[in-house]
Image (cartoon, grey):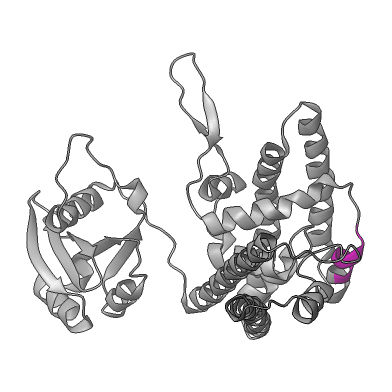
Amino acid sequence: MSKVRFIGLDVHADTIAVAVAEPNGEVRSLGVISNRLESVRKTIKKLGPVHQLRVCYEAGPTGYVLYWQLTQLGVTCEVVAPTLIPSKPGDRVKTDRRDAEKLARCYRAGDLTPVWVPDAAHEALRDLVRAREDAKQDQQRARQRLGKFLLRHGCKPPQTIKKNWTQKYMEWLKAHVHFDQAALEATLQDYVYEVDRAAERIQRLDKAIDEAIRVAPPEIRTVVESLQALRGIAQLAAVTIVSELGSLSRFNSPRQLMGYSGLVSSEYSSGNRVVRGKITKTGNAHLRRIVVESSWCYQHRPNICGYLLKRQKALQLDPEIKAIAWKAQCRLHKRYKHLAARGKNKPQIVTAIGRELLGFIWAVAVKTEAGLKTQTAK
């Protein structure tokens, strides 16, 4: 008879509710402990030999600190996807104790789906990339506030300045836009300062990303370089993909990656009736955003020039990787034209292109990772 005990943890910032599913079928609560390493260590010691314990908790804002603590203690631990935990429609009572018991019960039954836990290098790079994304959003908000302020007061640039937020636009704004009232002048200076500060912040983070890629492990740096062979995927997009996905070899097929991204159609079919709707939007939103943005490039005819040509020459990529990238251009552009001829709107077309682009991303990354393994074996 198996002696494995399944432990469910409902983790919060300060507390952890603990429940255990015994091999004989009993599921019971063990109370609440402090979310501190010493408390976790004492609890694990009381539960028995570590090789007989299987621990799980939901992915959430507390991150993977508890996962690393448990693995260092020698305990097998899994972080599970909260949206995929089975729930009863009629169950209207939710407490920490009940959540921990449900985790233990479902974990023993094999009904939970574990998520990928990044290693230290991937997690550090991911946090840096997400910080850059936050900075970009803050810059957009600062520009919108300044733009609406100027619109309210009728301040418009001369016709010689075609685009906003360029260097000429900012020079005009600082030299020619002023107000007689001190309150308005102070407001203008504050808005301009926020726009300049946001731009400096993005430049600083871009340099940090460049340095992080330079010193990154080969399994990260090489895949980032290979992905840049694809049209629409420069360094920032490639870093985002790798930091969010980790090793793409963990997906057995490109279809799994497409499903993970949430770019596949939802479906509600029964009998002879097949109904497909909008994309599911499950999985990683950061990955989905960057892939869809990259897909807009494939509305243009296949070509290797400009920044793409410079990237491929500078990185000295494998000819087979370049062949995959060229195949992607030809196929996805043809697909774009086909969907446009059927009357699909552009957002729908680009979403479909993004889904297929993930297949080429998977092919490039898997081939690169296989090549690294071969070199390491030699």
Residue at image position (54%, 74%) is: 131
Q: Quadrant of residue 174?
A: bottom right
* Span colored in magenta: 304-310
From where the camera sits, is residue 328 visible? no
Residue under the image location 9 percent in, 74 percent down: 46
> Which secondary structure type mostly characterizes the magenta part of the structure?
helix
Residue at 55% of width from left, 62% of height from top? 245
Relative placement, left or right, of 186 versus 271 is: right
Tally of numbered discs: 0
Is residue 309 a member of the stretch shown in magenta? yes
Q: Is residue 213 left or right of residue 101?
A: right
- Residue 347, quarter of the rendered image: top right
Please state which of residues 336 and 9 is positioned toward the viewer in this rendering.
Answer: 336
Please state, as top left, top right, bottom left or bottom right, where the C terminus lies in the image. Answer: bottom right
**Residue 329, placed above or below residue 181:** above
Q: Position of residue 150 (x, y in %)?
A: 68, 65
Q: Is residue 50 magenta?
A: no
Farthest residue toward the top?
A: 272
Is residue 290 or residue 100 the one in the foreground? 290
Residue ranking furthest to the front: 180
Residue 343 picture location, percent across and down: 76, 27
Q: Nearer the viewer, residue 343 or 65?
A: 343
- Give percent across and percent down for residue 27: 9, 52
Is 31 left, or right, of 150 in this rendering? left
Left or right, 100 with respect to 325, comes to: left
Q: Is residue 273 above or below residue 33?
A: above
Q: Position of residue 149 (x, y in %)?
A: 63, 65
Instruction: Quadrant for residue 338, please give it.
Output: top right
Relative to 319, say whether 200 is above or below: below
**Viewer can see residue 348:** yes
